[in-house]
Amino acid sequence: MASTNFIDYVKILCRSGKGGRGSMHLHRAKYNPKGGPDGGDGGRGGNVYLRANRNYWTLLHLRYDRHIFAGNGGNGGKDNAHGADGEDRYIEVPCGTVAYDAETGKYLCDVTRHGETVILLQGGRGGLGNWQFRSATNQTPRYAQPGEPMQEKTIVLELKMLADVGLVGFPNAGKSTLVSAVSAARPKIANYPFTTLEPSVGVVPYRGGRSFVIADIPGIIEGAAEGRGLGLRFLRHIERNAVLLFLIPADSDDIAESYRILLHELEKYNPAMLQKRRVLAVSKSDLIDYELEEMLRPGLPDSVPTIFISAVTGKGIDRLKDLLWEAMEQGGAHALELQNEDIVHRDREAALLHSDFAEWDDAEEQDVEEDEEELEEYDLETLEE
């Protein structure tokens, strides 16, 4: 089986319904042998919609249901009977899902609020029956319109998590430990790099019954914007965050240089991300004493608020929450209300979309092959018994 249920990238085939054809019918009755045209119009084809649903947190349900077909419109009938409209199809996705055209990489739409519905493909209009073409000079039209054809498109859906604060840091910088310390989330924690292989989200309680959402993504390494490591695949999850929290351990060789490298990777991925509010937290400060901490302070960046924290001992955690809350208020509120078109509404390169999907598809094929090998071993053991 698949190693994780967190699926943030799927490619599906969508097809709207074709319109029904209009009827070419002439009314005939016992006492009205020349009743004239009475052919009805065809029904419209079904539309394909994208709808946000807060009850979903991943695109897993679409991983094995990649064909979304709407219903065709019914044909018109006699006695001016209108054809039935085709059945609409709604694609339920988590809030924060973005749709792209798989062939061109063009941005199509995104949904961020629960219940927000956007049409992806328009169904074909139904054809007009011959009743619509009657006139004083053409009292018996013997023709009707066919319905409009369907539309078909391959769509790529990407989930960009909605959170107020996004964690940015190198592998093994203490991001997962911080999330587990300030929220009820329990991401995997271990003493080796790339412990986090999928994003995790936690709700951080704050004063006065308030709270904010923090998102942790796999660690970023130098060259992530060019595809190294896991950063390129998951950097999109911090595009919607209102505040970026940079986490650098206190035992780093050069904290300022590490911060510059992380900032450079974000700039290469999307320059608009540099417009976000930023906070720098020096983690694992329990490993150094007060004198060494004071020696490190002059070398920290001046352009960003900085704080020394320790998720293990709780040092600086409350002050960190205050800094994050102040940054959110200065940045103009909540991530759910973030309307930065430079970040959200941008096209993707089709080659990158296909390469990402190919990488995911190879992983899925590997899972299938492993399952088949397990079944073969099981069958052999059963025969031997």
Image: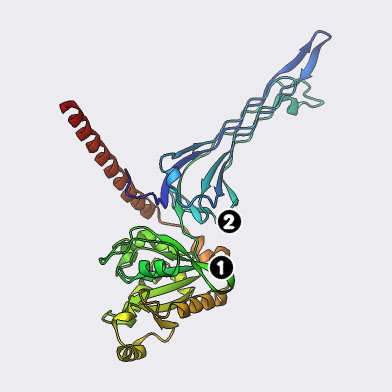
Task: Locate residue 249 relative to residue 52 in the image: left or right.
Answer: left
Q: Is residue 264 above or below residue 300?
A: above
The image quadrant where one finds the N terminus is top left
Residue 161 lies left or right of residue 217; in this view the side is: right
For the point 47% across and 59% down, the residue is: 161
Q: For residue 78, which quarter of the picture?
A: top right
Q: What label sits on residue 334 in the rendered view?
A: 1
Q: Amino acid at mark 2?
A: Arg
Q: Are marks 1 and 2 in contact (CB under 8 Å)?
A: no
- Furthest toward the right, the residue is 31
Check disc 2: other Cα within 10 Å, few if <14, some if 14-19, many if 20+: some
In the foreground, 83 or 51:
51
Mark 1 residue element: loop
Label 2 sits on residue = 113
Between 302 and 274, the one nearer to me in the picture: 302
What kind of residue is marked 1? His
